[in-house]
Image: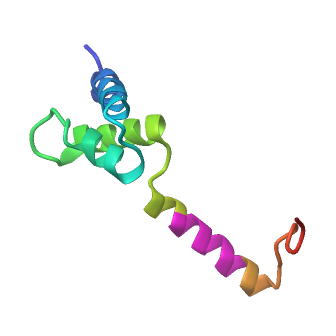
Amino acid sequence: MKSWREEAAPIIRRAILEGRAQGLDGAKLRRFVSERYPFGERSMYQYKAWLLEMKQQLGPSPKARAAAQAKIDAWNKKVGQGNLFEGEK
């Protein structure tokens, strides 16, 4: 028996290829892939496995990247660290 993530992987892969063929990228591609969710209600472990597989194939969402960058910026401000390459071109 396949795991939920193993079930989700080819569906997500197909949706990504289909979406890119339609010229979608970024948030529109994520939405397109998300609409292909096949496991019924978006809850419990199967939904978590779907999201993990989406992250694996598409990378972290822009919202998650922004949150991670905000944490880094807050830490740097707190400890007085600057950007190592600040001012370089």
User: How far from the left and from the top, in percent, is residue 72?
Assistant: 67, 71
Give the total of numbered labels.
Answer: 0
Q: Residue at x 67, y 76 (%)?
A: 73
User: How far from the left and from the top, in percent, is residue 50?
Assistant: 30, 38
Q: Is residue 49 above or below residue 60?
A: above
Q: Residue at x 34, y 46 (%)?
A: 30
User: How far from the left and from the top, in percent, is residue 79?
Assistant: 79, 83
Q: Is residue 31 above or below residue 64?
A: above
Quadrant housing the N terminus? top left
User: How far from the left and from the top, in percent, is residue 38?
Assistant: 15, 32
Q: Residue at x 27, y 25 (%)?
A: 11
Q: Nearer the viewer, residue 40 or 10?
A: 10
Q: Residue at x 9, y 38 (%)?
A: 40
**Residue ranking furthest to the top:** 1
In the image, residue 68 lies in the stretch drawn in magenta: yes
Taking the image as shown, residue 41 lies to the left or right of residue 86, namely left
Residue stretch rendered in magenta on the structure? 66-75
Residue 24, picture quadrant = top left
